[in-house]
Image (cartoon, rainbow, N blue to C red):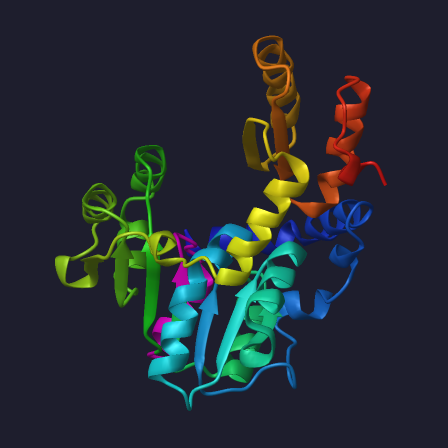
Amino acid sequence: MELLYTALLYIIQPLVWLRLLLRSRKAPAYRKRWAERYGFCRNKVAPDGILLHSVSVGETLAAIPLVRALRHRYPSLPITVTTMTPTGSERVMSAFGKDVHHVYLPYDLPCAMNRFLETVRPKLVIVMETELWPNMISALHARKIPLVIANARLSERSAKGYGKLGKFMRRLLSKITLIAAQNEEDAARFISLGLKRNQLAVTGSLKFDISVTPELAARAITLRRQWAPRRQVWIATSTHDGEEAIILQAHRKLLEKFPDLLLILVPRHPERFKDAREMVQKRRLQLHPAQQR
């Protein structure tokens, strides 16, 4: 199974490059830093510290209180935060600045992952949510580097899919030091896949530990006063392609009952902001003056 998985990863690399190029048409950042995606990151990280991976924006936000706690508890250890997308990269830099190092996590190719780990040499690796990369997990296990899956969740559907992998999945889970599940239901699903009790802890969701800074609260109040001091507001955030059309249709119906209603629409990826704006204009819905420019 491992050999088949790895062989397929190598075979599809030309398609991966094509996908990056296609995405770069709307988000030029996808055309940059390809070397990092193959483990070339020398001089961009500080070795012998803690490595934390958050695949994108949502996981990065959830990781903020964890990173702050790690910096407080281990002030002498450098922290490297990896992501997979430019949006996640931007969020890491805005959240932590120079307090952490940042690179893209390489693709799960043995050559790329080994090159990356030889450079970073982490003492501990923390992966947010449930990013299970077989070659990465095996490489960490071979180097005896502890691996923690933090804020882990596993839907019933995903558990059924993983369950079809049988021994391969049990062998993969046996190489993980600890899985910190969000709730008892998630924990039970990991156990059903073969995870041992001594590899499991139920810790709740880190997203509930995110604190709103006074500056952010003040900014929210200012925006409320500027945009809708007396209007009813509803928000659709982190939307994907295809969802905005449904939301705008619902908004049009709501306007029949609440003519002064304001919708704040926030696509998950910034490169789709222009598309969302064009959808609003195409449906002849009124854009707020702040969005006219």
Q: Say whether residue 64 is left or right of residue 14.
A: left
Could one spot residue 105 in this view of the protein?
Answer: no
- Does 39 sit above or below residue 73? above
Point 43% across, 71% down: residue: 67
Q: Say whether residue 257 is left or right of residue 32.
A: left
Q: Say whether residue 244 is left or right of residue 148.
A: right
Q: Quadrant of residue 253?
A: top right
Q: How many marks?
A: 0
**What is the x, y in percent for residue 140?**
39, 73
Point 36% across, 85% down: residue: 74
Task: Say which of 72 and 193 sits in front.
Answer: 72
In this view, the residue farthest toward the left is 197
Quarter holding the C terminus is top right
Q: Say whether residue 75 is left or right of residue 285.
A: left
Task: Say which of 255 and 126 sits in front.
Answer: 255
Point 55% across, 33% down: residue: 235
Could one spot residue 21 in this view of the protein?
Answer: yes
**What is the x, y in percent for residue 277?**
77, 32
Q: Is residue 128 magenta?
A: yes
Task: Say which of 45 and 252 sits in front.
Answer: 252
Residue numbers of the magenta segment: 127-144
**What is the x, y in percent for residue 107?**
58, 61
